C-alpha cells in the first residue's frame, strides 16, 4: 500500500520542527488539536510517526450539535489508536459574541491553551484554509495584517500544513484506511468561509486558470515579512514617543503613516483597548497630524479591569495623546452622564 501522501505530510511536520525548534525545545511533547476530521487526523498520524511517544491529543467538544460528545470521544480514541500517548476530550460552552464561528473559535483556543501544559499545539490549517483567510481579509478591507493570514508559528500555535492542500490530507487518510469525520458545519452555506470554499475559490480557479490558492498563500507569506518589519519599526517608534502622560505627538508626527498608526495600535492594546478599526485609527491619527481642536475618539474597550459601562477614549492635550476612561451612569429622565477619570 502506498503512503505517498502521508509521507508528504510527515515531511511537512519534520520541516516545521526543524524551522521552529525554539517552539518545542525543552518540551517532552507536542499537542495535536484533534477533531477527527481529515486534516487533523492526517496531521496526528504524521506527527506520531515523526515524534513517537511525544504526541498528546486534545479534542474539543463544542456541544453545538446532537451527538457531538460521541464524535469527540471517537476522535480521541482514533488519536490513541494512531499512537498518541494520551487523548483527552474537553467540553466547552460556546457563547454568542461575534457570531457562532468566532465564539466557537474563542472557546476552542482558550480550552486548548489552558490544557496544553506549556507545549506547542499543532492545529491542522491547510494551504486551502490560508487562501480562504486571505480572501476574507481582502474582502473586509482589514489591511495587510489580516491579509497576511495565519503564521506557521504564532506561539503557542503551530501550523505545519500551511503548504499542504486539503486534498492531500484526505488522500493520506485513505492510505491509512480511515474515513474521517465530516463536520456538518463545513458544508453549511450559512457560513461565509464555507461559501468561499465551495463557490468563490472554485470560480476563481476556473476564471484565472488555476493556482489561485497557491498564489493567495504566497501573498500571505510576502505580507508576513512586510508586517514583521513594520511592526519592529512601530515598536521602536512607540518607545521613542512614550512619556509618562501618553504619546508625544511631535515624535509621532515625524514618522511615516504606516509605522505611526501601528505604534498607536500597539499603544491602545497595551492600555486595555481591543484592536481599533481602520476608521478609528485614522481618527486618532488625525489628532496627531491634522489637529484642529477636535474632540476625543472612542475606542473598543477590552473590558479587563474596567468598570461596567466604562468606555475608553483617546484625546489630545498639550501635545500629548492620552487614554481616558469615561464612566457612564444613568440619571433620572433616562439621560446618561459621562465622566472622565
Image (spheres, rainbow, N blue to C red):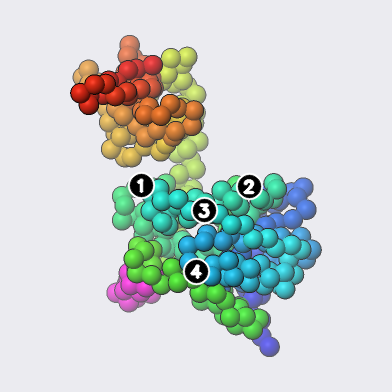
> Where is residue 307 shown, x and y percent of the image?
43, 26
- The residue identified by callout 4 is 66
| Secondary structure under the numbered disc 3 in the rendered image | loop
| Quadrant, the C terminus | top left
Magenta segment: 197-211
Residue farthest toward the bottom in the current orientation of the protein: 1
Labels 1, 3: front one: 3
Label annotation for residue 93: 3
Q: Are marks 2 and 3 in contact (CB under 8 Å)?
A: no
Q: Which of the two labelled residues, at mark 1 and mark 2, occupies the earlier sequence position?
A: 2
Q: Which of the two labelled residues, at mark 2 and mark 4, occupies the earlier sequence position?
A: 4
- The residue identified by callout 1 is 143
Q: Are marks 4 and 3 in contact (CB under 8 Å)?
A: no
Magenta run includes residue 198: yes
- The residue identified by callout 2 is 114
Using the image, determine if residue 69 lies above or below residue 308.
below
Labels 2, 3: front one: 3
Q: Which of the two labelled residues, at mark 1 and mark 3, occupies the earlier sequence position?
A: 3
| Secondary structure under the numbered disc 1 in the rendered image | helix
Q: Are marks 2 and 4 in contact (CB under 8 Å)?
A: no
Using the image, determine if residue 187 lies above or below residue 153.
below
Amino acid at each position: 500500500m502506498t503512503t505517498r501522501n502521508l509521507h508528504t505530510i510527515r515531511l511537512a511536520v519534520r520541516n516545521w520542527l526543524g524551522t521552529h525548534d525554539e517552539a518545542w525545545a525543552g518540551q517532552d511533547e507536542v499537542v495535536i488539536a484533534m477533531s477527527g476530521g481529515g486534516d487533523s487526523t492526517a496531521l496526528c498520524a504524521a506527527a506520531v510517526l515523526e515524534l513517537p511517544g511525544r504526541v498528546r491529543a486534545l479534542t474539543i467538544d463544542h456541544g453545538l450539535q446532537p451527538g457531538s460528545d460521541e464524535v469527540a470521544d471517537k476522535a480521541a480514541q482514533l488519536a490513541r489508536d494512531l499512537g498518541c500517548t494520551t487523548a483527552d476530550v474537553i467540553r466547552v460552552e460556546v457563547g454568542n459574541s461575534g457570531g457562532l464561528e468566532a465564539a466557537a473559535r474563542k472557546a476552542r483556543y482558550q480550552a486548548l491553551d489552558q490544557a496544553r501544559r506549556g507545549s506547542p499545539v499543532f492545529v491542522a490549517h491547510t494551504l486551502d484554509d490560508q487562501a480562504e483567510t486571505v480572501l476574507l481579509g481582502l474582502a473586509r478591507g482589514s489591511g495587510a495584517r489580516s491579509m497576511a493570514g495565519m503564521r506557521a508559528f504564532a506561539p503557542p500555535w503551530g501550523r505545519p500544513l500551511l503548504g499542504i492542500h486539503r486534498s492531500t490530507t484526505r488522500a493520506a487518510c485513505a492510505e491509512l484506511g480511515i474515513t474521517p469525520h465530516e463536520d456538518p458545519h463545513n458544508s453549511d452555506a450559512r457560513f461565509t468561509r464555507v461559501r468561499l470554499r465551495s463557490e468563490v475559490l472554485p470560480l476563481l480557479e476556473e476564471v484565472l486558470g488555476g493556482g489561485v490558492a497557491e498564489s493567495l498563500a504566497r501573498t500571505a507569506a510576502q505580507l508576513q515579512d512586510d508586517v514583521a518589519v513594520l511592526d519592529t519599526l512601530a515598536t521602536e517608534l512607540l518607545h521613542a514617543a512614550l512619556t509618562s502622560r501618553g504619546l508625544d505627538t511631535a515624535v509621532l508626527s515625524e514618522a511615516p503613516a504606516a509605522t505611526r498608526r501601528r505604534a498607536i495600535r500597539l499603544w491602545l492594546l497595551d492600555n486595555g483597548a481591543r484592536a481599533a478599526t481602520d476608521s478609528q485609527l485614522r481618527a486618532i491619527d488625525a489628532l496627531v497630524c491634522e489637529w484642529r481642536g477636535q474632540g476625543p475618539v472612542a475606542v473598543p474597550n477590552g473590558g479587563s479591569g474596567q468598570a461596567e459601562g466604562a468606555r475608553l477614549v483617546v484625546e489630545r492635550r498639550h501635545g500629548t495623546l492620552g487614554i481616558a476612561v469615561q464612566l457612564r451612569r444613568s440619571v433620572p429622565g433616562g439621560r446618561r452622564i459621562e465622566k472622565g477619570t
